[in-house]
Image: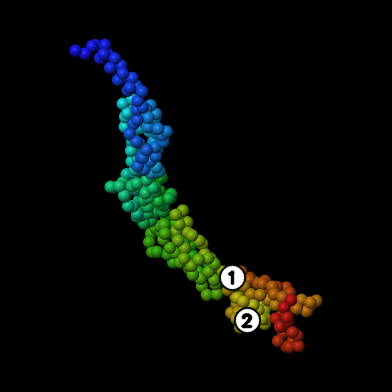
């Protein structure tokens, strides 16, 4: 028969041995799509958890090693951040959307919208799934109308034969003979209810000079042949002038602007009878 004293002594020794043993919890150094911060896995240390961008912590952000050698609470996991299908704005439709998690989108996923005809988009056409599991701000589609474009003086304008002109409708302009269109030939109704430009028709220039050699678009031409019907609005020519002191020639520009052109004061036109006079265009350049 075993003595009660011996039993108590044996129990005491067992408790002493357990008390002297270091308790270690299972290895927890790897968290898929995340990271674990720790010093050791021994009781009573605590470890903490973080997830990579695009994932969220499903569970506690820390755990403690207990006396029983277990983690409390249980270790978490890093789950992917997802967004439900985006809401479609009024008068819009999805033009690009490829969900990757069932019918949902993963963090960073994008959706692209476009507006229905006659509607303009205000805001970004592309939305993104955020780290909070929602989408960035949705755009707005608004119906846009433009007034009928005005006919320019000395010209004409064509546009769709309909009762109302809407966003992205176009109009084309033209001018009568001897007039030049100042602005684009085609304009468009923009998102603010205005036309992209307002072209006008500018008059040609009649030249008071009858005989001269000038430079036009980098080439020497005779005024009486090249511009016998006048110059169009916006055309530029360079006249030759004499520097009498240095006995050389230089050029000065002139431009036709809506029917008016200023001939440089330095230019001297010689009569066809004054054959003994040297034209400025034949003098060496300065």
The image quadrant where one finds the N terminus is: top left
Given contact means CB atoms under 8 Å apart, are the residues at marks 2 and 1 in contact? Answer: no
Q: How crowded is mark 2: few (under 14 residues within 10 Å), some or many (20 or more)?
A: some
**Residue that lies at the very extreme toward the right in this rendered image:** 245
Looking at this view, is 30 or 55 the one in front? 30
- One can see residue 62 in this view: no
Q: How crowded is mark 1: few (under 14 residues within 10 Å), some or many (20 or more)?
A: some
* Residue 235 place in picture, x, y as percent: 60, 73
User: Residue 165 lies in what quarter of the image?
Assistant: bottom left
Disc ID at residue 221: 2
- One can see residue 211 in this view: yes
Q: Secondary structure beneath disc 2?
A: strand
Among the two numbered marks 2 and 1 on one chain, the one whose residue lies closer to the N terminus: 2
The alpha-carbon separation of the residues under discs 2 and 1 comes to 18 Å
Looking at this view, is 68 or 182 the one in front? 68
Q: Which residue is drawn at 79% across and 77% down?
A: 246
Q: Which residue is drawn at 40% across and 51% down?
A: 126
In the picture shown, does residue 270 fall above or below 256?
below
Q: Secondary structure beneath disc 1?
A: loop
Check disc 1 and report the residue beneath it: 234
* Residue 243 place in picture, x, y as percent: 76, 76
Looking at this view, is 199 or 14 the one in front? 14
Looking at this view, is 41 or 226 the one in front? 41
């Amino acid at each position: 028969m075993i003595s009660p004293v011996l039993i108590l002594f044996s129990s005491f020794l067992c408790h002493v041995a357990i008390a002297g043993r270091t308790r270690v919890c299972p290895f927890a150094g790897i968290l898929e799509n995340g990271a674990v911060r720790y010093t050791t896995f021994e009781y009573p240390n605590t470890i903490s958890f973080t997830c990579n961008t695009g994932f969220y912590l499903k569970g506690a952000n820390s755990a403690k090693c207990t006396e029983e050698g277990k983690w409390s609470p249980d270790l978490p996991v890093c789950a992917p951040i997802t967004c439900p299908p985006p809401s479609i704005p009024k008068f819009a439709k999805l033009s690009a959307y490829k969900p990757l998690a069932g019918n949902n989108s993963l963090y960073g996923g994008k959706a692209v919208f476009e507006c229905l005809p006659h509607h303009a988009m205000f805001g970004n056409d592309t939305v993104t799934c955020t780290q909070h599991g929602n989408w960035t701000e949705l755009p707005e589609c608004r119906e846009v109308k433009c007034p009928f474009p005005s006919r320019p003086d000395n010209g004409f304008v064509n546009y769709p034969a309909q009762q109302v002109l809407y966003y992205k409708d176009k109009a084309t302009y033209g001018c009568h003979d001897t007039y030049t269109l100042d602005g684009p030939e085609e304009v468009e109704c923009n998102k603010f209810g205005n036309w992209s430009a307002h072209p006008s028709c500018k008059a040609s220039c009649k030249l008071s000079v009858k005989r001269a050699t000038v430079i036009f678009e980098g080439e020497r031409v005779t005024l009486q042949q090249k511009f016998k019907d006048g110059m169009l609005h916006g055309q530029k020519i360079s006249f030759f002038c004499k520097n009498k002191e240095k006995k050389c020639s230089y050029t000065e520009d002139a431009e036709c602007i809506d029917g008016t052109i200023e001939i440089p004061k330095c230019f001297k036109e010689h009569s066809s009878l004054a054959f003994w006079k040297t034209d400025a265009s034949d003098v060496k350049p300065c």
